[in-house]
Amino acid sequence: MNHKTIAAGGMQLAWYEYHPEKEKAIVFIHGNSTSSYTWRKQLTSNLLLNYHLLCIDLPNHGHSEALQQKDDFSLPALAGILAAAVEQLAGSKPFIICSVSLGTNIVAEMMATNLLVQGLMMAGPCIVGKGHELDKMILPGADATAVFAENVPHQMITKYAGEASLSTDSNDLEIFLQGYHAVKGPFRSSLYATIATGNYSDEVALLQKSGCPVCIVFGEEEKIVNKHYLDGAPIQLWHKTIHTIPGASHYVNIDAPEAFNELLAAFAKDVFTTNGS
C-alpha cells in the first residue's frame, strides 16, 4: 500500500485509496495501535469494487505524524482532526464511514461536526453514552491494558492480540504486531489519561442526534467487548438489528472478511440507494 499525506488539524496524516474513479466513497477508520492495514481484506475485496475506498492512519499510527505530549489526545480532539481529513478526501462525493474498535468512538465523536456522512458501519464498537458506560462495555476478565499503556510486556501484547482476533493466519498476527510497535510516542497512555478524566462525549446521544443509519456488527465470539451492551440504545440501527458474524472476535473484519464484506456491501448499496446517490 502506497500512502499519500494530507494536512488536517495542523498535522500530516497518511492515507490510502483504491478505485478513485468511482463516484461513491467508503472511508475506513482503524482502531487503537493498528493502522490502515487493518482494512487490507476490505480494500482488495471484489464486493467493493464499485466504491472509492479511502483509509486514514490515525495520528501517531502507521505513516501519520505524531501528536506531541503537550497536545490534546482526547477522543473529541482526535475526531476533529479526522473529520477535517475526511471532509477533504471525500470532497463532493457521497460517502459512508466504516470503523472498528476505537475508530468507532472517534467516528461517533465526529458526529458533533458538520460532516455530511450518509451512513456508518461500526465493527466491534466501543461507543459510550448514558446507560451504556465503560463498565457495561468491557467483558469481565478482558484486559485491554496493552492498548492503553506503553512498555507493555510482549506476552501481554500477544495475549490481547489473540483475544481481539481469532485468525489462525500467522501473517495477521505479524501485521498486528508491526502496527502496534509502530505507534509513535505516548499515544496509548495519553489517550487513556483523557478517558480516565471523562474527556469524551455521550457518543450514543451524538449518533442519535445525527439520525444517520448505523450498521453495528460484532463477532459472535467477541472476547473484549460485551456484544449486548448496546441493546436498546437509541440509535437508528440499519435493519433495526445489531448484527453478529460467527467465527469472529473483536476484529471481525479480519476474522471473517467474506461475511463482513458482504454486510458492508449490502449496507453501502442500501444507504446510497435510499439517499438517491
Image (cartoon, rainbow, N blue to C red):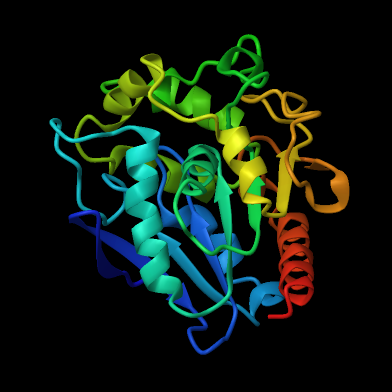
x then y, percent, for residue 127: 58, 33
Viewer-closest of 215 and 234: 234
| Apparent side of residue 16 relative to residue 124 in the rendered image (left or right) | left
Viewer-closest of 42 and 81: 81
| Apparent side of residue 114 relative to residue 6 in the rendered image (left or right) | right
Answer with the quarter of the image where residue 248 lies: top right
x then y, percent, for residue 91: 43, 77
Viewer-closest of 21 and 42: 21
Q: Is residue 168 visible?
A: no
Q: Count every numbered label the image shows and give the total.
A: 0
x then y, percent, for residue 214: 70, 50
- Residue 228 to residue 94: above or below: above
The residue drawn where x is 65% and y is 60% is 119
The residue drawn where x is 57% and y is 62% is 117
Q: Quadrant of the C terminus?
A: bottom right
The residue drawn where x is 76% and y is 46% is 236
Viewer-closest of 128 and 189: 128
The residue drawn where x is 48% and y is 80% is 92
- Residue 66 to residue 39: above or below: above
Q: Quadrant of the N terminus?
A: bottom left
Q: Is residue 160 visible?
A: yes
Q: Residue furthest bottom?
A: 21
x then y, percent, for residue 115: 48, 60
